[in-house]
Amino acid sequence: MTARPDIRALVAIPCFNERANILRTLDDLLSHLPEGELLVVDDGSADDTAAVVRAAGLPGVTVVRHPVNLGYGCAIQTAAKYALAGSYDAVVFFDGDGQHSGSDVPVALALIADGRAGVAVASRFLGSCAYDIPFSRRAGMAVFRTLLRSLSGLRVTDPTSGFQALDRRAMRICASESFSTAFPDADMLLLYHRAGLTVTEFPGTFKPRTSGRSMHSLVSAIHYIYKMSISMAVVALTPHKPDEAG
Amino acid sequence: MLSQQQMVGALLGFAILALIALLVYRKKLTEERAAIWLAAGLLIFILSISGALQRMLGTLLGSKNVPATILAVGVLFLLAICLDLSIQVTRLSRRAKNVSQEQALLEHRVAELENCRGESRGAGSDA
């Protein structure tokens, strides 16, 4: 990675049915990281997302495709497993729908490289967000932000941000069975924090989707709240395992 | 002498045991998965023919009606079976996820190795 030659980083782009957005997302990343190593994790898309990326033949871009749709959490876990096997020092999770900005990746990696963060999280509230966040989502964020703070003392403004950079210790947790693959958000930040990793936020630039449909719906919102509440309680009650982070 | 209700209960228990044995014999059910069903069939059979056990469970559950006692025990067993199946589904889902992830990573690795082989063959023919 040219931005931080002292660490070897992988930018992982989990995507599902992102044929219309994926090349724009990759162009954005490559314009900021011309020698970057990018991994597209196609989560069993019904469209030809993987084929479009392969056909483009972009330099430094690798495609891994799940045979079936496993979910966002599984896609980022696959990326963490790939990064661990490839001896990368850091992995950045970057959404394939074009909502994140490639210019923020070097900022995240700088935090990891300097040891200021084991987990660096982009926050739309510290940076900018070019679209209106629905009230229900804002309310959910506020609830889990408060829960996170009361359970661990961890102050995070954007607990649902998918733009995260992990160091190798965090990668090991992400690749382990402790990692919650259904909507990994605040519960995982709590898990990283309890494993002794420093969770640090930085200002992120969030853009609206240009096409396609978000994975967030009413049913998934209810599922999200249910799952997150249970998962956070489990993480909070599980004895701390420092060896897990290696 | 067994009452009609006891006979029906005993036959039901026996039928469950026979069905499970048949499914295991035909390899449609593993011995491991059959255990809880065999226990359910056995309990229904014993409960149907043992008046003492019926009275004991009836007192425990606050029921003086024998069929209601057997039904309550059956419902408890069904709950246990549902819970067991949920645990199995969770375990299998996790395994399926891991297998899918491994397959995706291996597929990529195979493609990489095939590319390398193609390149080395190309280099060999050039030379």
Image (tube, coloured by chain):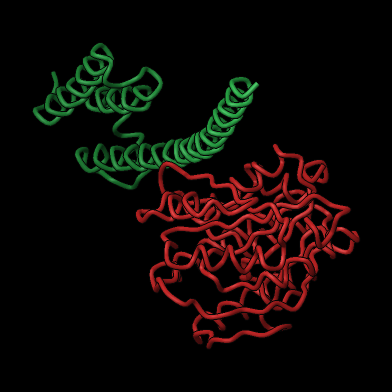
Chain colours: A red, B green
**Residue A93: x and y, percent?**
64, 59
**Can you say whether A104 is above or below A8 in the image?**
below
Locate residue A106 relative to residue B95 in the image: left or right: right
Compare residues A149 and A10 and report the one nearer the observer: A10
A185 left or right of A240 in image: left
Q: Quadrant of the C terminus of chain A?
A: top right
For image coordinates 42% across by 41% down, the residue present is A67
The foreground one among A212 and B63 is A212
Q: Is residue A61 left or right of residue A112?
A: left
Q: Quadrant of residue B44?
A: top left
At a point 67% along the width and 56% down the height, the residue shown is A11
Q: Which x, y percent locates residue A166?
A: 75, 56
> Which residue extends farthest front?
B127
Quarter of the image with the N terminus of chain A is bottom right
Residue A226 vs residue B104, the one in the foreground: B104
User: How far from the left and from the top, in percent, is residue A87?
Assistant: 76, 40
Above or below for A208 versus A217: below
Q: Of all residues shown, which one is farthest toward the left? A: B4
Residue occupying the point 12% across, 31% down: B5
Considering depth in this image, is A89 or A29 the residue closer to the camera?
A29
At x 25%, y 43%, the residue is: B64
Label tally: 0
Q: Position of residue A102 (x, y in %)?
A: 67, 69
